[in-house]
Amino acid sequence: MATSSVGNMPSTAALPAQEAARTHRATPTDEARGTKAPEDKPSLRQQQNVQILQASMDVSIQSGDSSLALLYRTAIDRINEYLEPELGPNAIGGKDAPDGSPEGTAGRILSLSTAFYDAYAALAQNKDKDPDTLARDFVDLIRGGFERGFGEARDILSGLGVLGEDSPIEQGINKTYALVMQGYDDFLANKLGTRPATDAPSTNDTNAA
């Protein structure tokens, strides 16, 4: 049985910028074509190609666990990249991958990324922001990093030919994506203090009763 080798997996932070620009909505031939990114030094391109190849080889096409480990690593790498201008390099650090379930993977990504809210809010350039703007900016930042990481993982798995409507691997990464995005929505709603309209009866309803 194939096992996850994410501990030995090379960092994906240096994956090609045109690959990183894709999200789950993009295919290898659509959005990335219209996205411009800073050109890498020619000397780095060979290293990037080697890293992609090694990452691909480390993912077992029979193992959903390995595919989620890849998604976790690319997501953390890209969130770190997005946090770097604010909090310095490798803010989250080298964390081991969680269990191979969508729930475990999503939960770890959410807990590690949202944990930096207070540090982000304490930065001098953010102290003058109103609380709602601060919360939205932070969630936009970490959400953007996750989406880029998800796009990279999906591209690698697509290149291995393991995705498709009936693929348990695709179902697993898509479920993880949905859980993370919902988690960011819930985190933001909590910071904004929003509540569903059905939480309490209206005054008129109470008087009518």
Image (tube, rainbow, N blue to C red):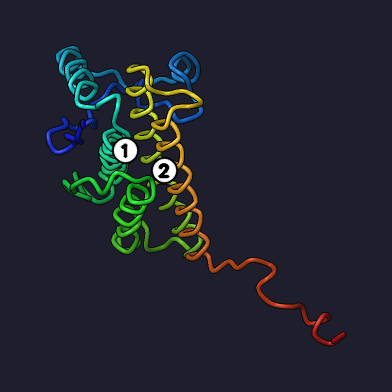
Residue 67 percent across, percent down from the top left: 31, 33
Residue 157 percent across, percent down from the top left: 34, 24
- The quarter of the rendered structure image containing the N terminus is top left
Left/right of residue 194 with respect to residue 75 in the rendered view? right
Disc 2: which residue? 176
- The CA distance from mark 1 to mark 2 is 8 Å
Q: Residues within 10 Å of mark 2 (few under 14, many from 20)?
A: many
Left/right of residue 189 with respect to residue 95 in the rendered view? right
Disc 1: which residue? 68
Q: Give the residue furthest to the left.
A: 8
**Of callouts 1 and 2, the N-terminal one:** 1
Q: Tell me the residue at 19%/12% (across/down).
A: 42
Helix, strand or loop at label 2? It is helix
Q: Tell me the residue at 29%/38% (across/down).
A: 65
Q: Which of 4 and 50 is in front in this view?
A: 4
Helix, strand or loop at label 1? It is helix
Left/right of residue 12 with respect to residue 182 in the rendered view? left
Residue 5 percent across, percent down from the top left: 16, 34
| Residue 171 sits above or below residue 190 on the image | above
Q: Tell me the residue at 52%/64% (across/down).
A: 192
Residue 58 image-quadrant placement: top left
Residue 197 image-quadrant placement: bottom right
Marks 1,2: beta carbons within 8 A: yes
Q: Please name the amino acid that badge 2 sits on.
A: Thr
Residue 135 percent across, percent down from the top left: 45, 58
Q: Tell me the residue at 23%/30% (across/down).
A: 12
Q: Residues within 10 Å of mark 1 (few under 14, many from 20)?
A: many
Q: Please name the amino acid that badge 1 sits on.
A: Leu
Q: Nearer the viewer, residue 34 or 38?
A: 34
